[in-house]
Amino acid sequence: MASNTQLAVIIKDDEGNQKDGTMYYTVFSAADRTKRAIIALIGCWIIAAIAIPIPVAHLALVPGFLVAGPVLAYFRLKMSESKEKVLGTCPRHNGEITIKLENTDTIPKYTYCPDCDGAIQIVEKTA
């Protein structure tokens, strides 16, 4: 079963100021990863089957979705966690911020504050 998890992080600016924050992400079990991969595979193949009667588009859509199915299934099977967002306080303007994360993002992450456009760094908080 997928579990929502939190990780304590520190949000730093380029002047050395820092504030605490929290990173939210979801961790998938092996069964969840398998289920998500099968759903992606079947979904792509169903779209490919639906595209068969479309006169000209089926020449690209059907092979595209037949190939995309196994590729998406492989990436879903390999993905063990899904990063969502970082909530915290910007050390530059002391306002609450929400930073959306991509699954490929790694910590430490260099980004910009969505409110003041100041350069910030997100690092894992050590004990």
Image (spheres, grey):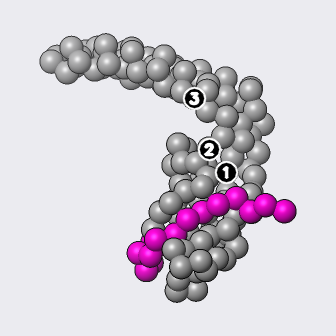
Q: CA distance from mark 2 to mark 1?
A: 6 Å
Helix, strand or loop for disc 2: strand
- Quarter of the image with the N terminus is top right
Residue in the picture at 51% in, 19% down: 42
Residue in the picture at 31% in, 15% down: 62
Q: Which mark is residue 82?
A: 2
Q: In this image, 91 relative to 62: left or right?
A: right
Q: Are marks 2 and 3 in contact (CB under 8 Å)?
A: no
Q: Which amino acid type is shown beneath numbered disc 3?
A: Arg
- Quarter of the image with the C terminus is bottom right
How many numbered circles are shown?
3
Specify which label sits upstream in the sequence, 2 or 3: 3
Residue in the picture at 41% in, 75% down: 117
Residue 12: which quarter of the image? bottom right
Helix, strand or loop for disc 1: strand
Helix, strand or loop for disc 3: helix
Is any atom of residue 46 visible in this view? no
Q: Are marks 2 and 1 in contact (CB under 8 Å)?
A: yes
Determine which residue is flagged by label 3. Answer: 76
Q: Nearer the viewer, residue 71 or 111?
A: 111
Q: CA distance from mark 2 to mark 3?
A: 10 Å
Q: Which amino acid type is shown beneath numbered disc 2?
A: Ser
Determine which residue is flagged by label 1. Answer: 25
Residues rendered magenta in the picture: 113-127
Residue 64: which quarter of the image? top left
- Check if residue 64 falls in the magenta segment: no
**What type of secondary structure mainly makes up the magenta span?**
loop
